[in-house]
Amino acid sequence: MSFSRWWTETTAALGDRVPLWLATLLLVLGAVLAAVGWYTFPAWIPRRLPRLPRLRRRRRAPRPADAPAPLVPAPREPEPELPAAAYVSLADRLAAEGRYAEAVRERLRAMIRGLVARRLLEQRPGMTVLEVVGAATESHPEVGPPLSAAGAIFSELWYGQRPASAEHDRRMREHGAELDRLLTGRPEDGPRP
């Protein structure tokens, strides 16, 4: 018997027992359930299948009373905040070694530390350069230009992965000096020769 003849006889026999409207309704309902199941596929599968109880359980050897307790790592202490001058000193040392990208990073840290020390900025872990600039310029708009320029240099080197040069370090020194001048209220030293 060929497949086509079998299919014809089977559907004819099914049509004699089930009315056409009911067969159509069951097919549509089955298609809708399959579509809903397909659409929500990951949601109806449990993340973790239940474990069946084991027939035999392993016996643990009792731990002697004098055995040391398992080591639990102590919570990390936050690193002590260094003054801005320490970051500047480290940046000078890195620049002398030719590690200009790291020197730029430390100069930016010194600027941020100076703002935090003067309580112009509340430092939160994970702040981006843009968040630091935005938070600092909210309370003191005059610090915006040098801080934004320093942040742009930092982003260009660290996020843009561009090679750093002595020129970048020199510009960061200038922006740091400008920010320090604005924060301390000292007048400019005059025109540079």
Image (spheres, helix red, strand yellow):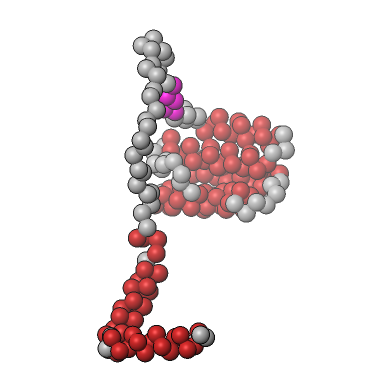
Would residue 12 be found to the left or right of residue 165 on screen?
Answer: left
Vertical relation: 86 (above or below) 111: above
Q: Main secondary structure of the magenta part?
A: loop
Residue displayed at 47% across by 89% down: 5
Residue displayed at 70% across by 49% down: 163
Q: Closest to the observer: 74 or 21?
A: 21
Question: What segment carries the magenta color?
Answer: 71-77
Would residue 107 be found to the left or right of residue 80 on screen?
Answer: right
Residue displayed at 63% across by 49% down: 157
- Can residue 167 be seen here? The reply is no
Q: Position of residue 164 (x, y in %)?
A: 69, 47
Q: Position of residue 77 (x, y in %)?
A: 43, 27
Q: Closest to the observer: 33 or 26?
A: 26
- Which residue is situated farthest in the top direction here? 66
Residue displayed at 39% across by 23% down: 60
Q: Is residue 157 magenta?
A: no
- Can residue 53 be seen here? The reply is yes
Vertical relation: 34 (above or below) 21: above
Q: Closest to the observer: 16 or 139?
A: 16
